[in-house]
């Protein structure tokens, strides 16, 4: 495994069908904490990890796990300055993706809020 890669990833990429890759994309965005982190970074431009921890009121370990996912999946990038790690959105298409999701939600909010299948554990 390359240096700096979190233990949450496979040593070698798996070959997956396009539909499975898209499902993984939505699962990466399917956590409210990860979405809030992206919103914070889009609002602020760049934040130190502890600023994210304080703003979310989450533990450092929890935020670190979410940052590993967002970084590995290409949503954010990290910049190390001494012992401090700063994060920012890695790609301008992240904003466009979230904007489209919000526009979709404007017309489908009630249906999505009422869907019980989404929260069912399989």
Image (cartoon, rainbow, N blue to C red):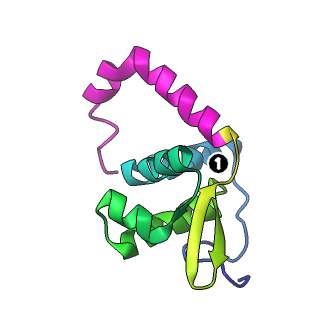
User: Is 9 positioned to the left or the right of 43 in the image?
Assistant: right
Q: Is residue 29 above or below residue 111?
A: below
User: Is 111 positioned to the left or the right of 4 in the image?
Assistant: left
Q: Residue at x 59, y 51 (%)?
A: 45
Disc 1: which residue: 21
Q: Residue at x 49, y 21 (%)?
A: 104
**Residue 93 drawn at (x, y percent):** 69, 39
Q: Residue at x 47, y 27 (%)?
A: 102
**Residue 65 drawn at (x, y percent):** 46, 70
User: Is 80 positioned to the left or the right of 41 in the image?
Assistant: right
Q: Locate residue 108: give its quadrant.
A: top left
**Residue 119 drawn at (x, y percent):** 30, 43
Residue 97 is inside the magenta segment: yes
Res. 20 in view: yes
Q: What is the magenta range?
A: 94-122
Q: Say which of 77 and 43 sits in front.
A: 43
Local crowd size for mark 1, using a 10 Å CA cut-off: few (<14), some (14–19), many (≥20): few
């Amino acid at each position: 495994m390359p240096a700096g890669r979190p233990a949450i990833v496979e040593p070698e990429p798996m070959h997956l069908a396009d539909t499975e890759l898209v499902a993984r994309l939505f699962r990466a965005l399917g956590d409210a904490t990860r979405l809030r982190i992206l919103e914070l970074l889009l609002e602020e431009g760049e934040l130190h990890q502890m600023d994210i921890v304080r703003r979310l009121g989450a533990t450092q370990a929890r935020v670190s796990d979410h940052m590993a996912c967002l970084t590995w999946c290409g949503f954010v990038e990290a910049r190390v300055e001494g012992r401090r790690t700063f994060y920012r959105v890695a790609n301008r298409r992240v904003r466009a993706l979230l904007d489209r999701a919000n526009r979709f939600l404007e017309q489908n909010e009630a249906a999505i809020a009422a869907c019980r299948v989404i929260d069912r554990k399989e």
